[in-house]
Amino acid sequence: MDATDVVLVADIGKSRCRVELRSGDELLGAADQHGFPGVHVENGPTLAFDLVLETTTLLPPGLPVSTLTGVGAAVAGVEASEAKSRELATMLSRHFGVPAAVLSDATAAHLGALQGGPGTTLIVGTGAVAFRFDEAGVLHRADGWGPYLGDFGSGRWIGQQGLQAVLLAFDGGPATSLSAAAGALVESPTMLPAWLAEMDNPYRAMARFAPLVLHAAEAGDAVAHGIVSEACRGLTRTVLLAASGDPSGTPRVTILGGVANSGFFEGLLQKSLASAGIEVVAPLGDGLDGAALAAQRRGLLQERYIHRDGTNWPD
């Protein structure tokens, strides 16, 4: 990226929307707020577009937004609808008057972590997915199938298992300190189903219980530790599936996502991965870095998975 380029980058997930204004490697300003269901839902492009504009207004005043050279947006739900992803790119390009690129949050995370190179990245946030791009730019993925059918070991999965453990303890199952942790949410475990049903985003609500499960596990709670250990085993399986066929020999993976920010969890996950012969390497960047790369460069290894506005902008 040229040092004079000013790009607007966004990471629009189901739990959070982050927007940054960058000039080269310099962060000029940042803002964040709530997330949205995904670009694939009904009216998804408009919801995402409005959320980007609204979040952009939260940037500190006086920033050179009018001098943009590109927009890059990592967006949840891109894999489910290429047409809506291109529609969002067109909306962003027309509004800001610059080239726009829309890509999945997982592809952006991979781009940022490996700076456009091949390899495997595991993203563990509200959901969980492993992405591997081979030397030909072909995507090999495992999991990321959402809260109903997948995302094993994700923040939502850990939180859900923790809440289920609370109800099981109430029914007479193994006692757990998670019951006291759930007391901050509801007066009685019997109220948990109704509490969850009232949430606008029940998956995000369950994911917010995950840090309490991790804390309880680190403090020695056997039930919580069992949940976290099972999550690590499931994530290791996900990485092995995505890395299958990697010609490099020893599989290598970068790990990103909010759940992985827990040092305790990261340590257990790395131990599980190592026992499966997988080497963990430090990421070079994150999803916002990947969105910025997509905004400023064409012909990337992952190009076929990046949805652009369709205008023939000059290089």
Image (cartoon, grey):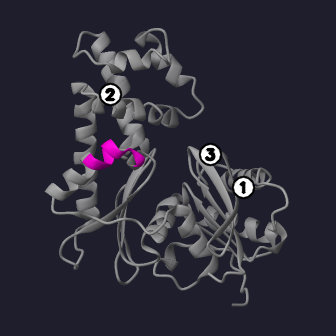
Residue type, label 1: Val
Task: List the residue tagged with mark 1.
Answer: 52
Q: Quadrant of the N terminus?
A: bottom right
Vertical order, 216 against 253 (above or below)? above
Left or right position of 103 against 258: right
The answer to whether residue 277 of the structure is visible from this angle is yes
Residue at figure coordinates x 34%, y 17% from the top left: 167
| Residue assigned mark 2 | 216
Query: Which residue is more in the foreground, 263 or 80?
Result: 263
Give, as a three-letter code, the residue at label 2.
Answer: Ala
Residue at 69%, 90% in the rendered image: 315
State the residue in front, 64 or 10: 64
Q: Amino acid at mark 3?
A: Phe
Chief secondary structure of the magenta portion: helix
- Measuring from the top left, give residue 297's x and y in whole percent: 59, 82
Count of marks overlaid on the render: 3
- Magenta part of the protein: which range? 261-267
Q: Quadrant of residue 46?
A: bottom right
Q: Position of residue 277 (x, y in %)?
A: 16, 63
Callout in the foreground (3, 2): 2
Element on which disc 3 rests:
loop
Q: Is residue 262 magenta?
A: yes
Looking at the image, which residue is at 28% across and 42% down? 231
User: Which numbered marker is on residue 36?
Assistant: 3
Mark sitting earlier along the chain (3/1): 3
- Quick one: 215 or 145, which is closer to the camera? 215
State the separation of the CA atoms marked 2 and 1: 36 Å
Sequence-first tag of 3 and 2: 3
Q: Are marks 3 and 1 in contact (CB under 8 Å)?
A: no
Check whether the beta carbons of the residues at disc 3 and disc 2 lie within 8 A of each other: no
